């Protein structure tokens, strides 16, 4: 296995801390402290920060420092606007490329998950992991590298949003499984337009839940 370069290690470490909100939105990063935490010199850290700025995960402010990118109302709207354009399109035009066995797997998984949620099992990480995989399934089916690159940026911002908003409502998680099942059932019947419409509806519900959780937690910024 090829050993990661110091630049790549620094990038991966800082990025992971941002995505998991160990470095929360609007947190000021100190270059010297980053060097100590990562055990790297100035060059790999600066290279990592430059890459993260391009991915809209940090902002380099002249004479002030480096700030972790915020999650504002505008940012959340932009995330969901992009998702509602790309994901339904991917389903309608490319979901036929996905093996039927995959749809059957996700159908079974959603039904099992909904039952576990009702039984109040602590399965949040598993639920989110399956959720991410299902959505990525449709993006990967497009075989379009531009879609994949766009969705990678959306994916990381969405993870931050999920952690920050703390969307752990049992009712919302159960509703998500039912919404996913509607998408999957339409795909199994090759009703691609219906599946795309169900995806759009699901994303609208997810957006609303994220806003409500952020407002309730007092984390919303204009």
Image (cartoon, grey):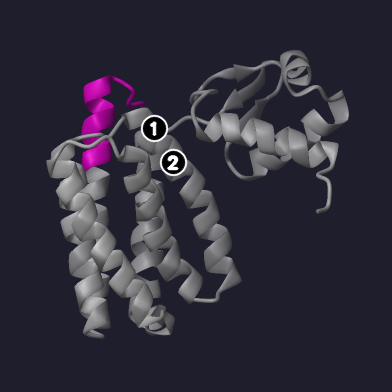
Q: Residue drawn 21% across and 33% down? A: 212
Q: Which residue is mark 1?
A: 163
Name the chief secondary structure element in magenta: helix
Q: Is residue 213 magenta?
A: yes
* Residue at image point 24% right, 61% down: 180
Identify the magenta region: 209-222
Which structural element holds mark 1? helix
**Residue drawn at (28%, 29%) of the image:** 214
Is 121 placed left or right of 143 in the picture? left
Magenta stretch holds residue 28: no
Distance from Cα at disc 2 to Cα at disc 1: 6 Å
Q: Is residue 173 left or right of residue 66?
A: left
Q: Position of residue 5 (x, y in %)?
A: 84, 42
Give SS at disc 2. Answer: helix
Is residue 18 left or right of 75 when viewed as pictured? right
Residue neighbourhood size for the residue with mark 1, other residues' Cα within 10 Å, grouped as few (<14), some (14–19), many (≥20): some
Mark 2 nearby-residue class (10 Å; few <14, some 14–19, many ≥20): some
Foreground of the two, 83 or 8: 8
Report which quarter residue 164 is drawn in: top left
Q: Are marks 2 and 1 in contact (CB under 8 Å)?
A: yes
Residue position for label 2: 159
- Picture coordinates of residue 110, whole percent (x, y): 24, 58
């Amino acid at each position: 296995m090829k050993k990661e370069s110091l630049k790549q290690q620094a990038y991966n470490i800082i990025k992971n801390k941002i995505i998991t909100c160990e470095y929360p939105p609007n947190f000021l990063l100190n270059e010297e402290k980053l060097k100590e935490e990562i055990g790297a010199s100035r060059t790999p850290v600066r290279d990592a920060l430059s890459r993260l700025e391009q991915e809209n995960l940090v902002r380099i402010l002249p004479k002030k420092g480096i700030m972790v990118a915020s999650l504002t109302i505008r940012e959340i709207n932009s995330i969901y606007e992009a998702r509602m354009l790309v994901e339904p399109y991917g389903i309608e035009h490319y979901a036929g490329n996905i093996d039927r066995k995959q749809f059957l797997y996700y159908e079974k998984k959603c039904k099992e998950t909904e039952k576990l949620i009702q039984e109040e099992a602590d399965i949040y990480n598993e639920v989110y992991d399956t959720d991410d995989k299902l959505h990525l399934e449709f993006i990967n089916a497009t075989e379009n590298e531009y879609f994949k690159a766009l969705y990678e940026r959306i994916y990381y911002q969405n993870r931050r949003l999920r952690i920050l908003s703390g969307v752990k409502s049992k009712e919302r998680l159960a509703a998500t499984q039912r919404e996913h099942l509607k998408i999957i059932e339409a795909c199994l019947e090759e009703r691609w337009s219906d599946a795309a419409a169900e995806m759009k509806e699901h994303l609208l519900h997810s957006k609303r839940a994220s806003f409500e959780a952020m407002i309730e937690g007092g984390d919303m910024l204009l």
